[in-house]
Amino acid sequence: MRIGLLGTGPWARAAHAPALSEHPGLDFVGVWGRRPEAAGELAAVHGVRAYDDVDALLADVDAVAVALPPAVQADLAVRAARAGRHLLLDKPIATTVAQGRAVVEAADAAGVASVVFFTTRFQPEPQAWIEEQARVGGWFTGRAQWLGAVFTSEDNPFATSPWRQEKGALWDVGPHALSVLLPVLGEPRRVTAAAYGPGDTVHLVLDHSGGASSSTTLSLTAPPAAAGAMTELRGESGVTVLPEARGDVVPALGRAADALIAAAAGSGEPHPCDARFAFTVTRILANAETLLHSGAR
C-alpha cells in the first residue's frame, strides 16, 4: 500500500514517520505539511518526497496517515476520502460533531477503509485485556484516570500545541480513556455529570448502555510525580485493572497500519477503531464540553 503522511509536528516526527518508514507492507511515498520547510526536513530524514501540494500527494498514494490538529485533520480526511484514499487517522477525529460526521459520511460514500489510532487499543497487553473484559461482562462500575503532565513538565514538545492549549485534557486524553471503557461497558446512554478540577482537569460520569456507570478523571496539568493512567473495573467477576502497556508507540502505530491494510483489502468487518467509533467518542466529548460550559467555573 502506497501511503503519504500529512503533518510534520512532534507526533509526526516521533511516531508516524518512523512507523510508516519501517513498515514492510507500506510504501512510504512522501510528506506534506503546512510548513513546507518542515516537510522537506522530515522527508529528507526518511528518504521520501516532500510535497508542497496536498492534492499532488493524494494523487500518488492509496492511503494517508494524518498527524495534524483535529480540525485540520477532519477537513483533510474528508478531502482524502473523496479522492478514494484510505485513512489512518489520529484521535480525536474532530472536536465538533459536524466535522466528525463529515469524515464518517465521506469515508462511507467513497467506500474507503479507516482506522483511528487510539494508542491503547493497538498495544497487545491492554488490547487483550479489553477483549477479555468485554467477553466476561457483568460489570457494575468502571473508573479511569488519565493524568498527564504535558503542561507541568519541562520541555514537553506538545505543551505549545495551540489545540491542546485550547481544548485541554478532555479532548487530548479523553479519547484514550473512552477507547478503553466503551468496548467493555457499552456506549453511554448519557453523560450524567461533568465538572472541572484543578488546571485543565475534568471529571466525567457516564451511564452506559450495558447498565454500568463509569467515572473518569482527565488532566494534562497533573504534577509530574502524579502522572499516569489507570482503569479499574468492578463487577460480578470481581476487580480487574488495565495492565500497563509495554514498548513504545511506533510498534503500536505499525499495528494500526496492519489493521488499515487488512480493512482496505476487504477482509471482513470494519476495524473496531474506525472513523465511526471515533465519531462516537467525539459526540460524547462534545456533550461533556457542553455540560462543562453550562456550569463553567
Image (tube, rainbow, N blue to C red):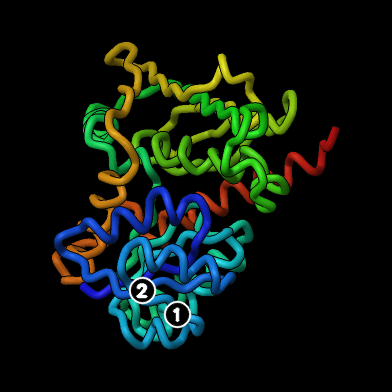
Q: Is residue 220 left or right of residue 195?
A: left
Q: Position of residue 18 (x, y in %)?
A: 32, 54
| Residue drawn at the location 37% of the way across and 56% of the way down | 16
Relative depth, front residue between 230 and 50: 50
Tag 1 near tag 2, CB within 8 Å: yes
Query: Which residue position is annotated with label 1?
Result: 51
Q: Is residue 257 left or right of residue 297?
A: left
Give the vertical position of 203 relative to 238 (above or below): below
Q: Quadrant of residue 75?
A: bottom right
Q: Is residue 296 left or right of residue 121?
A: right
Query: Which residue position is annotated with label 2?
Result: 30
| Residue drawn at the location 46% of the way across and 71% of the way down | 40
Name the amino acid type tagged 2: Gly
Give the vertical position of 192 relative to 38 (above or below): above
Q: Quadrant of residue 198?
A: top right
Give the vertical position of 223 relative to 76 (above or below): above
Q: Position of residue 97 (x, y in %)?
A: 60, 61
Cα–Cα gap, marks 1 and 2: 7 Å
Helix, strand or loop at disc 2? strand
Relative depth, front residue between 108 and 238: 108
Looking at the image, can residue 204 be seen? no
Name the amino acid type tagged 1: Tyr
Q: Quadrant of residue 264?
A: bottom left
